[in-house]
Every structure is written in structure tokens, then in C-alpha cells.
Image (cartoon, rainbow, N blue to C red):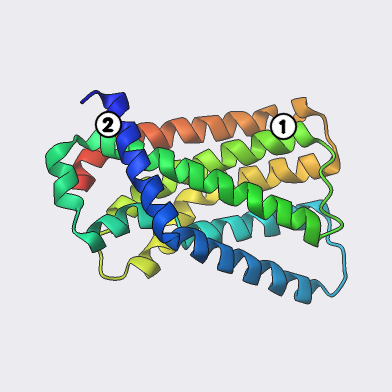
Amino acid sequence: MSTVAGTYGVFLKDFRSEIRTRYALNALFMFVVTAVTIILFALRGETPGPDVLSGMLWTVIFFSSMSGLARTFVSEEERGTTLTLQLITGPSIVYFGKLLFNVLLSLVLSVAISALYMLAFPGFVVKSFEMFVVTLVLGSIGLASATTIIAAIIAKASTKGTLYPVLSFPVLLPLLMTVMRATGMSLEGEPFSEALGQFQVLVAYIMVMVAGSYLLFDYVWKD
């Protein structure tokens, strides 16, 4: 089995499993609706500034991710299929297959939350749409690249729900600060060129996380 075919096979397995069970999607949907409703009640008709709105957006995306992205490896442990994957395919194939699935899930999550924000908050008006789209895509990929390896680390732990956000937050903090700033710039309507520095940070973050995870995954997956 080639690496590309194996990676696609792992991705397709997770995709079909999620479509069948909808565990992560249901958890994400309920969290997002609850979080946005609470924020609406807390604001009581007030219109926060762009920085506050972008901060709230990525806070909801972060905590929503914590309730769904960990399932990629936790579900393997619960079903007892971890050993089977280790026997029939290599660690790199498993990693990139899981990464692709998490990227897809993270993108769907980010787009859905952004659309809901635009409907729920009149002040959430994107003035630089291209900047916002690039920020959303790079932020989602960065989020998935960091949380995939963390999900593999905590999969065998007894306190998965507690460990996942605790380990993820310090790793994701540079990413969150960058995407919040870039999102605020898109809401303020700043030129696309002004965000190039933020995008360079995001691309560098993704490259470091993917490269580091690829090198470490063999030890994490087998131990």
C-alpha cells in the first residue's frame, strides 16, 4: 500500500465513522450553540469592538475543538482498533490520515462558527474578506496540526477530557494570539499586505508543528 493511498484510507475510515456516528459533530454543534447563546445574553445588545469580537470568535473555536478533535485517537482506543492499525499500516500514514481528517473537521467548525457569528452579532462585519478567509484557513490548519499530536499523546490516559485542553492551550497560545490579531485586522478593514507578517507566523507555526509531530509520532503511537 502506497503512502498516499494509505493516508487516504485512514482519512476515509475516520470520515465514514464520523458520518455514521456523528459523535464529534453533535458535540461541536451543541457546544457552539450554547456558547453563542450565552455570549448573546451576556452582551445584552451591546456591540463590542473588533478585537473583542475576534477574541470571542477564536475562544469559541478553541473550546469547540477541544470537544471534538480529540476523538480521532480516543475512538481508536475505545473501539480497540489501535493495535490493528499498528499492524497493518505505518505511523506516518496514520498520522497524516488523522491530520487530514482533523483539518477538515476544523475547517468545517471554523466556517460554521463564523457564519453563525455573522448572523448573531451585527457588529461582526468582515471588511477585508480575503484576509479573513486566509486567517480562517491557516488558523484551522494550525489548530489541527497541534491538536492531532496532543490527541495521540492523551489517548491512553484515564483523564482524557481534562488533559486535552490543559496540554493544548499553552501549545496553541501563539497561534490563538496571531489569528485573533489577524481577524481583528480583517474586521477593521486593513489592507491585506498589513497581515502578511501574521500569515508568515501562522505558516511557520504549521510547518514546525507538522514536522515535529511527524518526527515524534512513531514514539507516541507505539508507546
Q: Is residue 215 visible?
A: no
Residue 91 in the image: state x and y as whole percent: 22, 37
Number of marks in the rendered image: 2
Question: In this rendering, which labeled residue sits more in front, label 1 or label 2?
Answer: 2
Q: Which mark is residue 72?
A: none
Outermost residue to the front: 20
Question: Is label 1 in a helix, a strand or a loop?
Answer: helix
Q: Residues within 10 Å of mark 1 (few under 14, many from 20)?
A: many
Amino acid bearing label 2: Gly
Residue drawn at the location 56% of the way across and 44% of the way down: 107
Q: Quadrant for residue 214, please give it.
A: top left
- 219 is higher (above) or lower (below) than 214: below
Whichever of callouts 1 and 2 sits on the residue coming sooner in the sequence is 2
Amino acid on which disc 1 is placed: Ala
- Front residue of 110 and 184: 110
Q: Nearer the viewer, residue 92 or 150?
A: 92
> Which of the image's four quarters has the N terminus?
top left
| Residue named by callout 2 | 6
Q: Tell me the residue that label 1 is attached to.
A: 195
Classify residue 47 as left or right of residue 74: right
Q: Between marks 1 and 2, how big is the CA–CA gap? A: 37 Å
- The picture places residue 62, in percent across and down from the top left corner, at 55, 56
